[in-house]
Amino acid sequence: MSAERAGAVVVGAGISGLACARALVDAGIPVQVRERGRVPGGRMASKRFDGRPADIGAAYFTVSDPDFGEVVERWRAAGLAREWTDTFVSYGADGRRTVTGPMRWAAPRGLRSLLEDLAAGLPVVTDRLVTTVGPGPSVDGEPVGAVALAMPAPQAAWLLDPALAAATRAVQAQRWLPALTAVLHFPCRCWVDFAGAFVNDHPLLTTVCDDGDRRGDGAPVLVAHTTAGFAGQHLPQPTAAGPAVEQAVRDLLGLPEPAVHTHVHRWTYARPETRADGAYHLDDDGIGLAGDAFGAARVQTAWLSGRALGRAIADRLGVTAG
């Protein structure tokens, strides 16, 4: 499908972009999803190590909305998603304690497998870099009915023509924080049983997850997420941060053995620091924004935001979404 024929172009094949595209397709709107990466996923990314996936973006997701719950139930029935845990440990000034909360969900084949499922049947074009979104609206100079930017706001800002004043103001109002994710492979599971840990007031760590427990295969793999301050110091060379992250994890958990392999992934825009108004942005220029900045920074928020934007675009283009 060419942009000239598309009613809408969705830029970004993360969960908000795919939810937006699905809502448009369900409403009968011609759409094309353009993703600069090789595969869909966004920040629900997974990377394979010796054939085994590890989640390098979102650590898990939770469910409270019934509509999102229906999607998750379909994933569960297909064996793509599983209930993981409602119990984490918390490290802080008061030591180590157990905390309970909502059920956290995980994916045996990695969270990206859920995005692959969402993308099935959608017109997704990967390895497609969009460089300019202009008035009209237009995408790389080609006219379209509407454009949905499903990505962190700073990345959307790079694409916007300055003449798109409303969208420019909307993205400039958002602030985002970086993070590093370290995947640590150990020779054995030599830690006290835990599913995941919140690490409070630490100069380097924010969360550590037992990926073998999360995945359900018992592999001796931990995945750690860092603070924005630490990540900001290592964005130019994230690999160089590996030894410090490994040591911090070993000190936290009292691990006697070093990791046999460490992989560090950089997220320049890992999570929104500010919360945008409403469930999405759609202006008179036909430019929309969606994602987890429009609410609590969660996977469910991104899905709801994308779906809401897709329905709003369908209304704008003269079709009521079902």
Image (tube, rainbow, N blue to C red):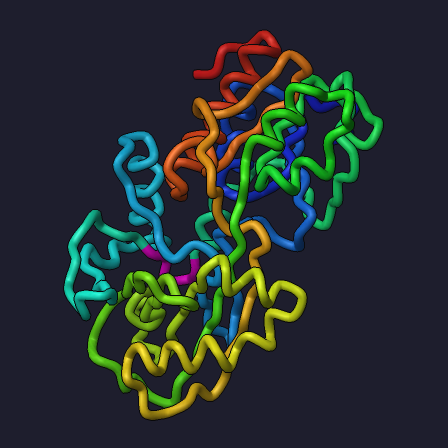
Looking at the image, the residue that sits furthest to the right is 141
Confirm whether residue 41 shows in the render. no
Left or right: where 271 falls relative to 300:
right
The answer to whether residue 319 is visible is yes
User: Dividing the picture into quarters, in which one does residue 194 lie?
Assistant: bottom left
Query: What residue lies at 38% left-to-right and 57% top-to-bottom?
Result: 59
Q: Nearer the viewer, residue 218 or 118?
A: 218
Q: Residue 55: say if magenta.
A: no
Q: Residue furthest bottom?
A: 257
Going 33% across and 53% down the picture, which residue do you hit? 81
The quadrant in which the N terminus is found is: top right
Which residues make up the magenta segment?
106-110
State the image coordinates of residue 322 (x, y, percent, origin top left): 43, 16
Number of callouts in the render?
Answer: 0
Q: Main secondary structure of the magenta part?
A: loop
Q: Residue 275's quadrant in the figure? A: top left
Question: x and y percent of residue 5 in the render?
Answer: 75, 22
Residue 266 position within the rendered picture, expressed as x and y whole percent measured from the top left: 58, 62
Viewer-nearest residue: 118 or 143: 143
Side of 303 relative to 9 (left or right): left
Give percent across and percent down for residue 50.
52, 78
* Residue furthest out toward the top: 318
Placement of 33 over or under 52, stated as above or below: above
Q: Is residue 108 magenta?
A: yes
Rendered position, 172 above or below 81:
above
Residue at the (60%, 77%) spot, across then down: 240
**Residue at image location 75% in from the left, 39% down from the top:** 130
| Left or right: 55, with 98 as reference point | right
In the displayed structure image, the side of residue 117 where residue 107 appears, left or right: left
